[in-house]
Image (tube, rainbow, N blue to C red):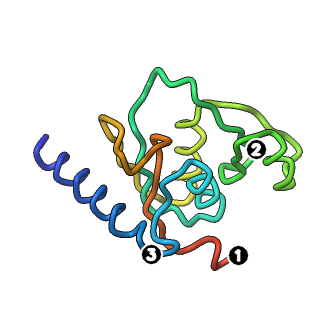
Amino acid sequence: MAAARRATREHKLARLAEQRQRPGGAATRLADVVNASREAALDTLLLVDRPDSADRLWAGPIPMAIGESKQDIKALGADQAYEDRLDEVLLRALIDTDGDLELLDEPSGLLPDGVGGLLRFDPIRTHP
């Protein structure tokens, strides 16, 4: 079982490395993951498992209303905004858009922010 999980993680990281070479194929920075989550473009969230992390994001009343600041949420038209753990906010948006999650045991050089994703489509090309 552990070998199968390791193979799956390695496969997804290899896909991330490959897809980041083409526009709209992958998100390797937090801001790109947040944007892809808002647009339901995130197919697979790659997240370094850090239960003790103090990293935070902002969220609104619907799961896809997420941002790096309270102002981001207000700009999306939400009347309420609250701050929560980064992983919690991203997971709520991921579940709402029927995405997959791949937890990583350790940081990857591909993910400087400890978070990334494989995309369903390029959110920038869909909504310039």
Residue carrying label 2 = 60
Instruction: Tell me the quarter of the image containing the N terminus.
Output: top left
Q: Amino acid at mark 1?
A: His
Q: Residue at (76%, 45%) from the top-left corner? A: 61
Foreground mark, 1 or 2? 1
Q: Position of residue 56 (x, y in %)?
A: 63, 32
Q: Is residue 73 left or right of residue 119?
A: right
Q: Quadrant of residue 126?
A: bottom right
For disc 3, the neighbor class at 10 Å (few under 14, some 14 to 19, many from 20) is: few
Compute the Cα span from label 2 to label 3: 31 Å
Q: Position of residue 34 (x, y in %)?
A: 62, 52
Q: Is residue 91 left or right of residue 70?
A: left
Residue carrying label 3 = 22
Q: Is residue 34 left or right of residue 4?
A: right
Q: Position of residue 62 (x, y in %)?
A: 72, 49
- Classify mark 3: helix, strand or loop: loop
Q: Residue at (22%, 53%) from the top-left corner? A: 10
**Vertical position of residue 48 compared to residue 111: above or below:** above
The mark that comes first in sequence, 2 or 3, is: 3
Residue carrying label 1 = 127
Foreground mark, 3 or 1? 3
